[in-house]
Every structure is written in structure tokens, then in C-alpha cells.
Amino acid sequence: MILRHTGPKSEIFDPIFTESFMVGNLGGLDATATTWFGDKQVYVHLINLLPITSITETLFDQQFVAGQYKSIMDSYWETEMAWRGYLVCNHAIIDPAAAWMEAKKLVSYQLDSGISLSQVLYFIGTRPPNLPQYNVTAEDSDSSCSANPQCAALNLVGDCCPANSGVFLGCCR
């Protein structure tokens, strides 16, 4: 476990850190519950989460995030869009389905330059184990074979793009 992780059972740091689950700055004999760029708790948590990679969930396991997320979840709508991508990834560790719905509300070009909407969606979609299947097609698209010229030319009927099984046939544009 990383030294910056704390939590209610920590015997290393003062109560201010155990209540917030995270140390912001740690160096020499100093430990603070803030960052150099702000004192919002969400900043402290998310700066420690960076970068979002395949190892993130190993460093921040589900048990830790379940407690930690409760201490920052109320700040979601107060958090700048630049940071929300990271917050959504953090949430995906404990609730990928809810994080997916949050990710759909992210404004791609307003995210921090260290993360993209594609990266957020990939991270959510690869959370183990046995995640629900997500439909990433346009919600207003017509899946019928007749709505897709190449499928219609083959005289296919029903749904093709995707078919009822969720598979996109080769005739889909």
C-alpha cells in the first residue's frame, strides 16, 4: 500500500488524514491534507490517482476506494470539468455502471490534457470482473436492416446494426 493512502484504520497519520483517506503533500517532516494548487479534498485525492493506467486499480483497490469515494463524492458537481474525468475513473473502480453514465456527461475538450474521454471510457470498460455490457451506439440510430443500404440490398430483415444478439453484421455502414 502507498504511504499516502490512509483511512480510518491508519495508525501512521493524524486524524485529519485518516478522515480524508489521503495525504496531499508528503516530504521530509511535512505532511499536509492539501495540494500546492488548492485545498479542495477532491484535488488531494485525484492528484494521487494520476496517471490513470492499468495499474491504477491495483494501487487504489476497491476496498480503499469504497471508503475514500464517500469522502469526495458530494463534490462531483462542484469539481471543474478538467478534473471530472479523473473523478469518474476513480468511481469506476467501485461502480463501473454508474461511472459510465457519468462519463456520458463529460465534455471532452474541457478535460485535463492528461486524460481523454476515450481513455475514461476504456478505463471504465476494462474494470474487472464481469462488467455489464455497454451499448456505445448512438441512442437515436436505427438498427433495422432496411435503414442500412448495404443490408437492405441483401434483402435482410429485422435488426442488423446491431442484430438482436448485439453483433453488427458486415453490411452495416
Image: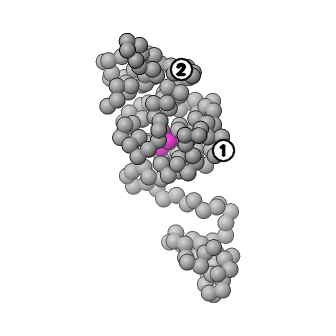
Disc number placed over residue 36 in the picture, else none: 2
126 w.r.t. 110: above or below: below
Please indicate whether residue 142 sits to the left or right of residue 134 in the image: right
Q: Main secondary structure of the magenta part?
A: helix
- Of the numbered discs 1 and 2, the one sitting upstream in the chain is 2
Report which residue position mark 1 lands on.
109
Q: Could you say where residue 168 lies in the image, as x and y percent from the top left? A: 55, 72
**Residue at 43 percent of width and 22 percent of height:** 23
Q: Secondary structure at mark 1?
A: helix
Asked if residue 151 can be seen in this view, the reply is yes
Looking at the rendered structure, the kind of residue marked 2 is Trp
23 w.r.t. 56: above or below: above
**Distance from Cα at disc 1 to Cα at disc 2:** 25 Å
Disc number placed over residue 23 in the picture, else none: none
155 w.r.t. 107: above or below: below
Looking at the rendered structure, the kind of residue marked 1 is Tyr
User: Local crowd at mark 1 within 10 Å, few (<14), some, or many (≥20)?
Assistant: few
Asked if residue 62 can be seen in this view, the reply is no
Q: Nearer the viewer, residue 47 or 162?
A: 47
Q: Secondary structure at mark 2?
A: loop
Please indicate whether residue 124 sits to the left or right of residue 75 in the image: left
Q: Could you say where residue 57 lies in the image, as x and y percent from the top left? A: 39, 41
**Residue at 41 percent of width and 19 percent of height:** 26
**Residue at 47 percent of width and 41 percent of height:** 52
**Residue at 55 percent of width and 76 percent of height:** 169
Q: Quadrant of the C terminus?
A: bottom right
User: Local crowd at mark 2 within 10 Å, few (<14), some, or many (≥20)?
Assistant: few
Query: In the rendered structure, which segment of residues is drawn in magenta?
Result: 88-92
Q: Mark 1 and mark 2 in contact? Answer it, CB < 8 Å.
A: no
Q: Could you say where residue 16 lies in the image, as x and y percent from the top left? A: 43, 15
Residue 91 part of the magenta segment: yes
Residue 130 part of the magenta segment: no
